Amino acid sequence: MRNIRLFLVVFALVVCAQLSAQSITPVPAIVRGGVCNGEVCVPATPFDYKQSFKLFFVGVDDVDTQRLEAAVVAAGLDVKRVKKRAKSGYLHFEVKPEMLPNDEGYAIVTTDEGIIVTANTAAGAFYALQTMRQMVESGDWQTGIIADYPRFEYRGVLVDISRHFRTLDFLKRQIDMMARVKLNRLHLHLTDAAGWRLQVDSYPRLTSYAAWRTPHDWKGWSNSGKKFVDEGSEGASGGYLTKAEARELVEYAADRYITIIPEIEMPGHSDEVLAAYPELKCTHNPENQGELCIGKEATFEMMQAILDEVIEIFPSEYIHIGGDEASKENWKLCEDCQRRMREEGLESEEELQSYMIRRIEQYLNSKGRQIIGWDEILEGGLAPNATVMSWRGEEGGRIAAAAGHNVIMSPHGYCYIDAPQDAPYSQPESIGGYLPLEKVYSYEPIPETLDEEVGKYISGVQANLWAEFIVEDSHYEHMLWPRAIAIAEVGWSMPERRDYADFRRRAVAIVDRMIEEGYTPFDLKNEIGNRPESLTDVEHLALGKPVTYLYPSRYYAPQYAAAGDATLTDGKRGTWTYSDKRWQGFLGRGGVDVVIDLEEVMTVRSIAADFMQICGPGVFMPCLVEIAVSEDGENYTKIADIEWEVILDELPSFKTFGWEGETRARYIRYKAHRSKYTGFLFVDEIIVK
């Protein structure tokens, strides 16, 4: 406690003038310029960071000394190690527990004589150096103090190397950039249906067979039967990390104070495992099985043997075991799974999955490790010590936190950065939707409705970048940056310090620097922005008028209800994504069939509505739109039949289906028919003029 009090006394000497953190990302907690000593205050002045510094460490072991020295050089500072404190031109690091209130926090005091960095841990000192590096790169360094610390312990990014394998060098490049913005967890998605990406000696066919496929791209592979091939076969594409490479990556990340959390998917997303070891399928043996058989003891023998090898490579306290999107239909038909349920007294297949998760957790706990799983691990009962990663929204996180479990917030609507970040027509092919930098940055990991005590269980936040449609490394970087920088600031900086306009200015500078260094981030300064139609409400004759949904179109999808029955005449146009609560989604044989009551007979000259098409998630244009009008609500006259040939394409598109002319009407019937492709119709507003 003495050191904390000493820090507070030192900080009290720091000047009075608050400065903006012009170049520092994530934005620091406290930035003040100049120094006061008694009644004498010296205002902030530009600092000569190009001088040669005498580098001195206190309380730093040999390993961390090497790491910090490398970070000093990377920051662009000219230094020479000395064996005692210098009186001028110094760069002095003191690392000692309880110097600051936060383990990853730091303080940088800059005077004309030199720089003093204090921190509880070497990680805090490393983050101080990232701040110093940004000040060097921007040329914006003044005398004064920066006192900073992260809001959340966990600040992560998921990198998917299953769908398309990424090399060791590529992963190192991303780790370098993560470190510069103080991200500290790399969630490495090593296994999934599309390929196994880690050497496992006990089950060699996972890499000699399940890591290779043809063709190379995920979409082509998925559409051609999802076949794997032996390593070395003609046209074989894929790859995996050897144990030596994985260990090298772990060490590389540790040198930058980043922990790698490996993910071994179970029981779902295991098509590649079953392709290599089909004996682990359920007994009824349908052609397509993606879930491990929980009834077979061999499944547990395999998973435990794999985890033993994973533990040898990855020192992380946490191992991610997936647990998401497991179809339970196979288990309902499987003799072994049903026998397991009877023996264990399990009443549902949800409890069967929970049985597996609990058993794997017990095994990992016996090895001194903990599990993280996607929020589906809540179903059937949560394993006692599990951390929940909430992705299907925030509800899973709320439930887990209320039960006293640590939670990583990663909701799809804010943190799944596989969606386009700008006008979809201007972006490479992706899963669809629209997730701009501003929306990612707006995310608040602790919901307002969460009790303060429960909120303490929110440990952090993570961005996830799935790679189904991301074949090239350059495309992956384009999708990752700068949105991962927004997640870094969300995870580090307190909400009251965050301002999007200021962040965007800083992010543009970072992106420009990344491009100079050979990265391929999204070029933020040339952002097009949201769909122009969505920026202002539209005035028209049907605004606010009642809409009757005719059977069976009354059943618009509840998850895409938007504003409910008011959606189609509320004056709000849709953005680039159907998940914006403006587009209304219809799934079913009826398509769209509605009647608008204008409440009086009037002259109508135009009736139109917009639809979107994004083939990846199954969103298609209508093949036919019929428009009819009536003055009495009983006798209708058809005024338009608009046919359209729906063609599968890669990029999102938007089209207006409408009529122009002149007629008298009180009631307007607008009917859109689904095409031969099974999927959604999305419409935002029926505009009548």
Image (cartoon, grey):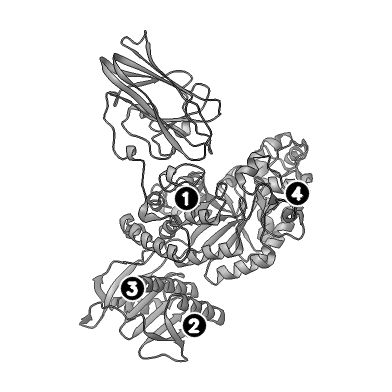
Give how far across and how far down residue 569 sits, in percent: 33, 27
- Per the rendering, the mark at residue 198 is none
The answer to whether 273 is drawn above or below residue 89 in the figure is: above
- Dot 3, crowdedness within 10 Å: few (<14), some or many (≥20)? some
For disc 4, the marked residue is 276
Q: Is residue 144 visible?
A: yes
Give how far across and how far down residue 681 sits, in percent: 47, 29
Q: Quadrant of the N terminus?
A: bottom left
For this rendering, which residue is in front, 299 or 362? 299
For disc 3, the marked residue is 139
Is 63 left, or right, of 546 in this rendering?
Answer: right
Task: Kindly indicate whether the residue at mark 4 contacts the one at mark 3 (C-beta within 8 angstroms).
Answer: no
What amino acid is found at the position of numbered circle 3 in the picture?
Gly
- Dot 1, crowdedness within 10 Å: few (<14), some or many (≥20)? many
For this rendering, which residue is in front, 616 or 371? 616
Give how far across and how far down residue 209 sits, in percent: 74, 52
For disc 2, the marked residue is 59
- Dot 4, crowdedness within 10 Å: few (<14), some or many (≥20)? many
Say what secondary structure mark 3 lies in.
loop
Task: Kindly indicate whether the residue at mark 1 contacts the one at mark 3 (C-beta within 8 angstroms).
Answer: no
Q: Quadrant of the C terminus?
A: top left
- As measured in the structure, the alpha-carbon distance from the residue carrying label 3 to the one carrying label 4 is 55 Å
What amino acid is found at the position of numbered circle 1 in the picture?
Cys
Say what secondary structure mark 2 lies in.
loop
* Residue occupying the point 56% across, 79% down: 63
* Picture quadrant of residue 296: top right
Circle nearer the N terminus (3, 1)? 3
Task: Kindly indicate whether the residue at mark 1 contacts the one at mark 4 (C-beta within 8 angstroms).
Answer: no
- Per the rendering, the mark at residue 415 is 1
What amino acid is found at the position of numbered circle 4 in the picture?
Ala
Circle nearer the N terminus (2, 1)? 2
